[in-house]
Amino acid sequence: MNLEGIYQKLTIKDVFDNQEEIMEYYFGIVVEAGKKYRYTNPFRTDKTPDCFFKYSKNGILLFYDYATSKVYFNCLDIAQLRTGLNYSQLHGLMDFTSLQIL
C-alpha cells in the first residue's frame, strides 16, 4: 500500500490563512484588530493594556508591543514564544488535519 500523498505538507500560506485562530489559541482571547482594542502582553509583566493587533499592508496580523525590543510579532513568533520552540521544531508539531499549531 502506498501512503504517499495522504498527508499534505502544511505551507506558510496555510499558516497565515489561519493566523487569527493561531493568535487566539496562544493568547486565549478573541483577537480584535485595531488600535482602539488594547491588550496586555502575556509574555511579560504588563499591567497597562497598551498592546494591540493590526494587519500589515500585506495582510499579516501582527501583535504590537512598543515596550519590548522587538516591536511586533506575527503568529509564528507568538507560537515560538509560547512553546519555546524554533520555527523548524514548530513545523514538526503542526497538526495537518486542523491546521492548528499545537
Image (cartoon, grey):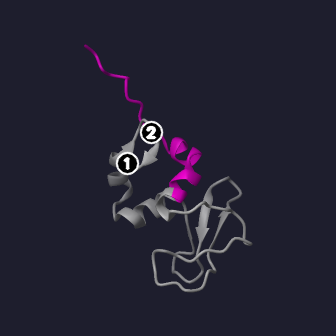
Residue 2 in picture, x, y percent from top left = 28, 16
Residue at numbered disc 1? 91
- Between disc 2 and disc 1, whose residue precedes? 2
Residue at numbered disc 2? 10
Image quarter of residue 79: bottom left
Residue 41 in picture, x, y percent from top left = 53, 76
Q: Residue furthest top?
A: 1
Q: Which mark is residue 62?
A: none
CA distance separating discs 2 and 1: 8 Å
Taking the image as shown, residue 4 lies to the left or right of residue 9, namely left
Q: Residue furthest right?
A: 36
Identity, as a three-letter code, of the amino acid under mark 1: His
Q: Residue furthest left?
A: 1
Which residue lies at the image location 52% right of the left edge and 81% below the top edge? 68
- Asked if marks 2 and 1 touch (Cβ < 8 Å), the reply is yes
Which residue lies at the image location 66% right of the left edge and 74% below the top edge? 38
Residue range highlighted in magenta: 1-24
Please determine whether, in this image, residue 59 is positioned above or below residue 74: above
